[in-house]
Structure formats: structure tokens, C-alpha cells
Image: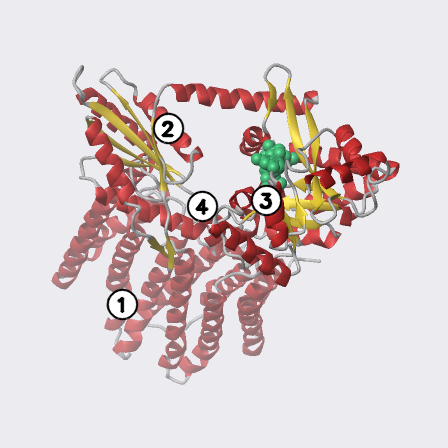
Amino acid sequence: MTEKWRLLALTGVTATVVYLLDLNPVINAVCTLIIGGNTVWACFAGPRRYGAQPRRAWQLVGWAGIIFLLGIIVRPFATDAGLPLLADACTIPGYFLFCGFFIVLLRARQSVEWHTVIDGMIVCLAGGLASTLLLAVPAVRVPDRSDVVSALAGLYPLFDVVLLMLVLSLTFTARSWPPSLISMVVAMALLFVGDLGYAIVGASGHLYTTPLLDAPFLLAYTAFGVTPIHPSAVEMGRPARPPVPAWSGRRMVLLVPALATPFILLMTVGDATGHRVAIAVIGLLVVSLLLVRAIAAVRAQAVAQHYAEHQATHDALTGLPNRRLITTSIERLLGKTPAGGPESTWVLVLGLDGFKYINETWGHDTGDRLVIEVGERLRSGFPDEMPVAALGGDEFLVAALGDRADAERLVATVLGCFDRPFVVSDVELKISASLGIAFAGPEGEPEELMRDADTAMYQAKSEGPGNTTFFDVSMHDQVRERIEMEVALRQAIVDEQLWVAYQPLIDVDGGRAIGAEALVRWSHPERGPISPAVFIPIAEDAGLIGMLGDWVRQEALRQLAAWRADGTVDDDFYLSINVSAKQLTVSTFPLVVSAELLRFGVPARCVALEMTESVMVDNSGTSARTVYELRELGVKLLIDDFGTGFSGLGYLRRFPVTGVKIDRSFVVGLGADEEAGEIVRAIVAMSQALRLSVIAEGVETRVQRDAIAAVGVTIGQGWLWGPAVAPAEFAAAWHATGTAATLAAGLTERQR
Ligand code: C2E
Ligand code: CA
Ligand code: CA
């Protein structure tokens, strides 16, 4: 199928040729109607077909096309009837519509620039001067004709110049020239030629002579029809902000003739005084504009350069100096630090506590705005000459020269910035910051100093929110230790140094093991056993938790399948497996678990997954979806360390949780302090209302067991019944039938 725009171009050229044959007025009118009709159709239908925007702009040209068409048809008859103004009454509004089209299009491209506008004005002035002196003035002198008619005839080229200027500002700001743009430029040029022809004829005293004069208009029409129907029309309305050079060869082609115009006119028609005055005034204006333009271009260049420099040395979000710029400030402070005195250069690095949580709960927009607010508060908290920087993310840096007491004051001032809550997008956020601080004498290196403060800050973070840590060299060892641990852990997963221990979950009433928690163990070949409390956080930080978690889960499910097969456990016995919050952000997690259940032949009801409350307050959506999909599989979902989180309890209703594990810290307090008892009672009451199972963790004594039983907790876990042990040991102690079971019963009996 031939493309529509080719068909339109072919029809247009053919109709023009037929028109030129001037067979008879009716055929000519038909040709004109075909061409004009095609273009009008293209303006309305093209953008709809290819989605060229803005649609309104193209509709304006469509209407301009209709009006021009009317003008062309009317002109021969109107001229014959002695009413040439009738045709102009059609044509002139068409020009305004055309102007509207360009303005709407340029605005959509957001590419109106000062130098472009000034260039247009220069060309316009020169063109206007030329067409007035060469065409309009002679036309007015033609006798036996209304001055209005004559002046109009001479002014058409001026309209074209305005349009030409607008089309040129389109081309100046276009990175490439799509076919649509080319056809539009061609159309404008043809329109100009046509109007010039009429104007010349008009200046010689006639108004309408031969069909040849109409040919440029018909072809212009055709070219303009191609523009909206060509697929590349979509490119024209797209916002284009290429850095447009203020001076370019293309522009010179336009500007040089414009500048030369006054001089050429002075030499050719500059004999009359009136003409000379006009030329002088316009010439002066053109030169002034040229000067304004030059200044504007230089200023724009300077602004752009300043902007680029600022961007490179400042944080984009807060506008504070960035790491690069602050390094030189610290260097300067170090240079000013006196050797041997009590004064040093101090560098304080601070990180917002729980920033990730804020981002996830309230969105990155709020997070960004919080960072901006913190930056402003810090900046206004210190004198201007004191360096305050943003290190990216949620970290800031303050540097100062002084003694230890000054450093303490610095810390106090920074902490003071967090006394009041931050109000960000209508949310009141009370946050704290972790501070790390380090110092150096004149021989210090800025990078080292910053790194030390950073290390101290991470140390402070690890000790809990709102902490301040002064750097000391042992921290380097801790950092190294952590890195070594990470390497060793990777190796441990590969070398099978990990194994899974099982701790029974006991039915408090009967003393029977109704399930077990799977707890990972690491036996390091040299260091011996390493606690999961140490290596799990490292695995989470190092991105190893997914791999590690997969391994533990598969190992545990394999073990459960074996125990179920050999009768060690009965059909209701379940394994509780820890799942880290990071694992739940992986959307395929439920799919993986479901496949594993099938693979090991373990029913979903025999598996519980333990997760902390932090999962429930993560608003990112992925975790929530994952939790729902897991519940749909039929596995139990338990909240681990229940009561220690800072979240409300609303999530218990919103999430498909099946039970809670009361944190050890409450169980320890049971019987001893009244408050712990109240909390546990409240948790049990709420769980009963929501039909959740309740497990008490860390039960070590019979007193604690009796206390939990008294408040209605039915399941316990803790050293009272036994620690987590290797699978063989577990099976021996807790066999569902036979001797082990009797032994277990005896054990609980004794403890009662
Ligand atoms: P958790 O999930 O709260 O596990 C309970 C911890 O309390 C275990 O420490 C357990 O040995 C210990 N415990 C049990 N009974 C008593 C008691 O009567 N008294 C006292 N004082 N402690 C008791 P463990 O095995 O060192 O694990 C520490 C933490 O490591 C776990 O806390 C859990 O958060 C994490 N963890 C362990 N295994 C895994 C795992 O496979 N995956 C993940 N993601 N985390 C795990
Ligand atoms: Ca647990
Ligand atoms: Ca726990």
C-alpha cells in the first residue's frame, strides 16, 4: 500500500499541472479544491492517525487551509467584480491562524529562546523594510486604486516573513530535520515566492493576471499537506531542548542578508528623504538588536558555565557542597591547624537513622524532602564560614577547627538539630541521627579523616539509633574483621560449614514437641562456632542472605521429610523457619517455596515462616504481596520477636498472620516485673481475639513456664525444654513414639 503522504504529494503535483494548462475555470476550481481539500483532510486526520501533538496546533492549520482555499477561489471572481478586498478578508485571518499554529507548536517544544526570538525580529525588520520600500510604497502610488488594496498587496510578503521567522525558529531548535519539517519549510518558501509574485505584479498596477501566479500556492498547499500526514510529524511537537548554539552557520545564512538589507536599500531606493529616514531607523534598530543578542548570548554562556561548575561541586538535592568540594575545605582547615597545640581539624559525619524505613513507608519524595530539610537545619545551625556538606543519600558532614571541648559542642549542636520533629509533606517525622567524629593534625589527609569519621558513624549506627562515636584506631580492625567475616561466610556456604539445629516448640500443657524452629549454625574450621546473631546481619548486608536462606530452608525441609517418613514426628509436627525481610522483597519467593514443598513432599501446613514486624511496615508493596502469596500456599506465618518492633498493631489485621512469638525480653520479666506481665497478658488477649497462636520464646525456668501458662500462652520454646540441637540428637530426644517420647515425657514430668 502506498503511503498516504506519497499519494497526497502525487495528487497535488498532478492537479497543479492540470491547473497550469488553464483549460477552463471549472476545471481549475476543481483542481484547487482537490489540493486544498487534501491538505485540510491531512491536517485533521494525520495527527489523529500518528498521534502528532499538540492536536490543537494541527487543527489551527486545518482551519487556515480552509480559509486560504476560500481566498483562492474567491479572488478571481472578487477581482472581476471590483471587490478584491473580499479575497483579502479571507486570506488575512488565515495568516493569523498560521501564526497561532507555530506559537502553539513552539510552546509544546518548550524551545523558545531569546536569541532565536531576536534573530526572528531582525529578519522581520529587514524583510518588512524591504517589502515596504520595494513593494508597498510603489503599489500605493498606482493610480485608480484604493490605497488599502495596494498596501495589502505589498504587505503579504511581510506576513510571510513573520511565518518564515517562526518556521526558522523551529528549524533552529531541531536536532535533526525530519521529512515533516522539510516539507513545512518548502511550503513556507513557496508561499513566500507566491506572495512575492503577487506583490510584484501588484506594484506594477495589476491585481490578478495568470494562473502561473497561483502555482507556488498550490504547491505550497501540497507540501503543507505532506507535513501532518507524514509519520515523522510526531517528532515536531516533542519537547526538544538541545543546547542550541547562539551562533551557527545556518543562522548566519539568514542574519547576514538581513543585516545587509538596509545598506542595499540605501544604495538602490535611498534617494527619497522619507526612504532614507525609514532605512536609518530600521537599520539602527537592527544593529541595536544585534548588540542585545550578542550580550544575551555571552550572558547565557556564562550562566551555563557557572551552572555546570556548581553542579560538579554541589549536591543536587540539597545544594550543599559535595564530597569533592568539601575535601578542599578540609584540606584548607588542616593547613590552618597549628602543630603540637590542643587544636585539631574535626570532621563529623552523620547519617539519618531509619532513613530507608522512611523512604519505604512514605515514599522517596518524602525522603528527599526530609534530606533537604535536614540540610537546611544543619546549614543554619552553623556560621557561614564553617563547612557543611551533603555526602549523598542521607549522610552529611560538618568540619571545624578546635579542641576537644569545641568538638563536644559541635556534636551537641548537630544533635540539637534533631530535637524538633521535621514536618515533611504533612507528615511529622521525629528522627535521630548517628554521628561519627574523627580528628587530625596538620599532617592529616582529608580523605583519611573523612573515612575515619565514616567508620565511626557506622560504628555508632551499629550501637543503635542516636549514638555518637569518636573514632579510634581499633575501629579499623573491626572493619577489617567484618570484611574478613564476609569472605569467610561466602566460603562457608560453598564448603558446607553450615548446618541446621532444631529447637523444640513445646505444648506447655502436655510437654510434647509439636514443632521445632530451624536455626542455622556455623562451625568455622579455625574459629569454632560463630553465632548467627553475628553472621546473619553480615549476610544481610553482603547480599548473601538469599543464598543462605535458601540453603537453610531446603536443608530443613529435607530433614522434615525424612522425619515424617521414618516416624520420628507425627503428621501435625511443623518446622518453623526464619525468613529475613530482604528475602521477602523478592517477588518470586512464594513460587520457590511452593516448588520446594512439592519437591520434598511436605504439606504446607507443616511449615511456618518466621518474620519480624519490619516486614509488615514496609510499604513498598512487594513484601506485602509476597506475604499474601505465601499464606495462600497454606504455610503458617509467625511474627518473630513480637513486641520489640516500633510499629502499631494494625498490621496484624491487615496481614494474613497466623501467630506471634513473644520476645524473650518479656518472658524474662514475667513474674518479676509487673509491666512485662501486663504486656504479655495484653498480647494474649489480642491474639485470642484475632485467633492467632501464641508462642513464648526463651523460657528458661519453671517459674517462667508457670507464668506463661497462667496468662494463657499454650506454646513455649526455651532452654527449659532444651536448646537447638543437631537433627540426630533432636530425633533421639523428641521421637513421637517409643522410648524417646517416654523419656521426654519423663523429663517434663520431673520438671513439673
Ligand atoms: P531468633 O529467631 O529470635 O531465635 C531465637 C534465638 O534464641 C536463637 O538464637 C536461640 O538459640 C535462642 N534461644 C532459644 N531458647 C533460649 C533461651 O531459653 N534463652 C536464651 N537466652 N536464648 C534462647 P540463635 O540460634 O543464636 O539465633 C539468633 C538469631 O539469628 C535468631 O533469633 C534469628 O533471628 C537469626 N537466625 C538464626 N537462624 C537463622 C536462619 O536460618 N535464617 C535467618 N534469616 N535468621 C536466622
Ligand atoms: Ca526465630
Ligand atoms: Ca525470636
**Mark 1, other Cα within 10 Å: few <14 / some 14–19 / many ≥20:** many
Q: x and y percent of residue 300 in the render?
A: 27, 44
Task: Report the image quarter containing ligand 3.
Answer: top right
Residue 590's place in the image compared with 236, above or below, is: above
What residue is shown with label 1?
A: 136
Pointers 3 and 4 in contact (C-beta within 8 Å): no
- The answer for how far apart the CA atoms under marks 1 and 4 are is 37 Å
**Kind of residue at disc 3:** Gln
Count of marks, rendered view:
4
What residue is shown with label 2?
A: 456
What residue is shown with label 4?
A: 175
- The answer for how far apart the CA atoms under marks 3 and 4 are is 78 Å
The label number, if any, that marks residue 704 in the structure image: 3
Quarter of the image for residue 381 reads top left
- The answer for how far apart the CA atoms under marks 4 and 2 are is 51 Å
Q: Split into 4 quadrants, where in the image is the C terminus? A: top right
Q: x and y percent of residue 139 in the render?
A: 28, 70
Residue at 35 percent across and 80 percent down: it is 85
Pointers 3 and 2 in contact (C-beta within 8 Å): no
SS at mark 4 in the image: loop
Q: Is residue 449 visible?
A: yes
The tag earlier along the polypeptide, 3 or 4, is 4
